[in-house]
Image (tube, rainbow, N blue to C red):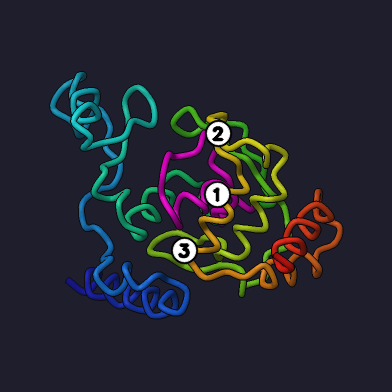
Amino acid sequence: MNALNERDRRNARASSKLSAALPLSMLPQDKPPTAKPLLGSKELPGPLSLATLSGYGMMTRLDETNGYQMDHASTLFGRASIAARLAPRNTTVCALTAAWVWIGGRFPDTVDVISRSHYRSTVHDRRIRVFNRKSPQEQIMRVGDAHVTTPARTACDLVLLPEYQEYQGKGDAVDQLVIDLMLEYRVSAEDCLQILERNPFWPHASFGRDLFTAWSRG
């Protein structure tokens, strides 16, 4: 019982910290789900259960034997709980994975994290893509069990990706993903410019500055 009370207190503090950045539609009813977010073959009644539940839209498959429940993926805290179980310990979720936490959609093909370590193994058929960049505390937020880059920092990371022109190979521009993220969380181009101007030597930083400068004049 004490553990549950402590978890409720942590979630309340996280919700309070996020309230300034979150859309009103997510507060305060976006409660952390209580059920297990990831289910594998051991938790499901049979080998075809994952395919069946995915077909009914109740789960999304991550690989042949594991998936996440859609009632978790429909909320911010639910997506954060999923990301926390996919990301290696003591890492910060960033880039495409952070964008998924903030706005949802299709789960990306990589698990993007900030870390000083390198990971050769995959998680649920997804490569762990590591970014070793300076990450001040003000650019990281605790959402449930996950450490996630803020919406502004996430927007910066997205425009610096090598694949910024195409998102997940489906013809959706990363630029549109950045716009959706900025609109959803009221991030300004000036917010992103401040981050990039403090880190001029990040790869593709000049492109990011030019992009956000153009948007700020827009």
Mark 3 closeness class: few <14, some 14–19, many ≥20 residues within 10 Å: some
Picture mark count: 3
- Residue at the (26%, 37%) spot, across then down: 39
Q: Amino acid at mark 2?
A: Gln
Judged by depth in the image, the label closer to the viewer, 2 or 3, is 3
What is the span of residues highlighted in magenta in the rendered image?
91-114
* Residue 184 badge: 3
* Residue 177 badge: 1
Q: Secondary structure at mark 2?
A: loop
Q: Secondary structure at mark 1?
A: helix
Nearer the observer, 162 or 165: 165
Q: Secondary structure at mark 3?
A: helix
* Looking at the image, residue 50 lies above or below residue 6: above
Residue 24 relative to residue 157: left or right = left
Instruction: Give the x, y percent position of residue 107.
Output: 44, 40
* Residue 47 among magenta residues: no
Q: Quadrant of residue 194?
A: bottom right
Q: Quadrant of residue 165?
A: top right
The quadrant in which the C terminus is found is bottom right
Residue 19 relative to residue 59: left or right = right
Kindly indicate whether the residue at mark 1 contacts the one at mark 3 (C-beta within 8 angstroms): no
- Residue at the (61%, 75%) spot, across then down: 138
Instruction: Give the labeled residue for mark 2.
Output: 168
